[in-house]
Amino acid sequence: QVQLVESGGGLVQAGGSLRLSCAASGRTFSSYAMGWFRQAPGKDREFVATINWSGTNTYYADSVKGRFTISRNNAKNTVYLQMNSLKPEDTAVYYCAAPIYDRNFLSGGRRPDYWGQGTQVTVSS
């Protein structure tokens, strides 16, 4: 059974930092892109960041560029999201997903096969 398990969410003050982890089990994603998405209450799920299989190419939503960093450790089958300078508008449930066939899938491309259960990030002002 394939599972993606996120961890590292929590409550933090504005300006603070959190590091999310997503550990995959049941299969390896070392040859595939992986990504992070988020969904705030009452809003659609949105793209946050993706990383290619080797970690050499990363893409970010404009809203998080310069503050968030996605990385991966293929030996551990894990992808990370380092979130700095957090803002109240970053409050959401954060999900990891894999494989990322098309990072624009929210607009109609091929969806990832697997999603994690999500981890709550709450940023207080």
Image (cartoon, rainbow, N blue to C red):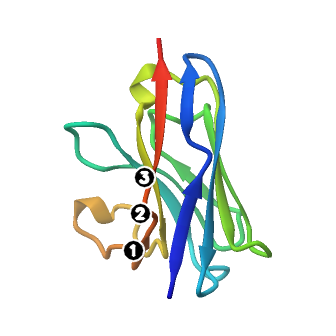
The location of residue 105, given as percent across then percent down, is 31, 66
Secondary structure of the residue carrying numbered label 1: loop
Q: Is residue 82 left or right of residue 5?
A: right
The residue at 47%/11% (across/down) is: 125
7 to 40, vertically: above or below: below
Q: Which residue is at the far right?
A: 75
Q: Is residue 77 left or right of residue 98?
A: right
Q: CA distance from mark 3 to mark 2?
A: 10 Å
For label 3, the crowd category at 10 Å Cα-Cα, with few meaning under 14, some 14 to 19 and many 20 or more, is some
Contact? badges 3 and 2 (CB < 8 Å): no
Tell me where residue 19 sits by quadrant: top right
Mark 2: amino acid: Arg
- Residue assigned mark 1: 112
Mark 3: amino acid: Phe
Q: Nearer the viewer, mark 2 or mark 1?
A: 1
116 to 68, vertically: above or below: below
Which circle marks residue 37 in the picture? 3
- Residue assigned mark 2: 103
The residue at 61%/31% (across/down) is: 67
Contact? badges 1 and 3 (CB < 8 Å): no
Q: Is residue 101 left or right of residue 31?
A: left
- Of pointers 3 and 2, the one earlier in the residue sequence: 3
- Of pointers 2 and 1, the one earlier in the residue sequence: 2
Mark 1: amino acid: Pro
Secondary structure of the residue carrying numbered label 2: loop
The location of residue 33, given as percent across then percent down, is 56, 71
- Of pointers 1 and 3, the one earlier in the residue sequence: 3
Q: CA distance from mark 2 to mark 1?
A: 9 Å
User: Which sits in the foreground, 16 or 120?
Assistant: 120
The location of residue 7, given as percent across then percent down, is 59, 52
